[in-house]
Image (cartoon, helix red, strand yellow):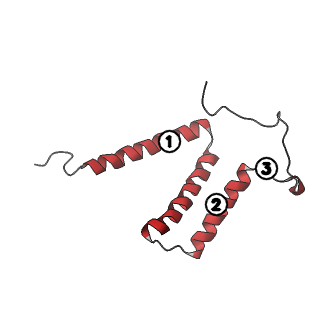
Amino acid sequence: AKPFMHGFTGWAWVIVALQAGGGMLVAAVIKYADNVLKGMATGVSVATGTFASTFLFGTTLSMQFGIGAGAILVSVYLFSNDLPVACGGGKKAKSDVEMKALLPK
C-alpha cells in the first residue's frame, strides 16, 4: 500500500500554496473593493498572461482574442477614469464620491 500523499513532490506543494494564496487574494479584493473590480482584474490578468505567453512559449493569438482583450482593456480604462468634459464627464463633487479606505486603520 502506498502512502496517502504518494507522488506529492515539492512542486505540488508550491502549486497548492499558490492556489491558496490566490484564494486569499480574491477574498481580500472582494472584502475591500467589489465584485466588479474583481471581474475586471481577472479579465486584465487573463489578457496580460496570454499576451506574455506569446513571448515566453510562442503561443499564437487569434484575431478574436485580440478583439476581446482590446475590449477588456478599453472597458477597464473607461471604468477607472472620468470622461473628459467634452464628452459630458467632468470632476465629481466630493460629496458625490464614496470612497472607502483600502486598508483598515
- In the current view of this chain or complex, which residue is farthest to the front? 55
Name the residue rendered at 72%, 35% in the picture. Answer: 99
Residue 98 is situated, as x and y percent measured from the top left of the image, at: 75, 35
Callout 1 secondary element: helix
The residue under label 1 is 25
Determine whether, in the image, residue 15 is placed left or right of residue 102: left
The residue mark sitting in front, 2 or 3, is 3
Relative to 26, residue 53 above or below: below
Residue 7 is situated, as x and y percent measured from the top left of the image, at: 20, 52
The residue under label 3 is 82
- Amino acid type shown at disc 2: Ile
Name the residue rendered at 60%, 31% in the picture. Answer: 103
- Amino acid type shown at disc 3: Asp
Tag 1: Cα neighbours inside 10 Å, few (<14), some, or many (≥20)?
few
Callout 2 secondary element: helix
Determine whether, in the image, residue 38 is placed left or right of residue 58: right
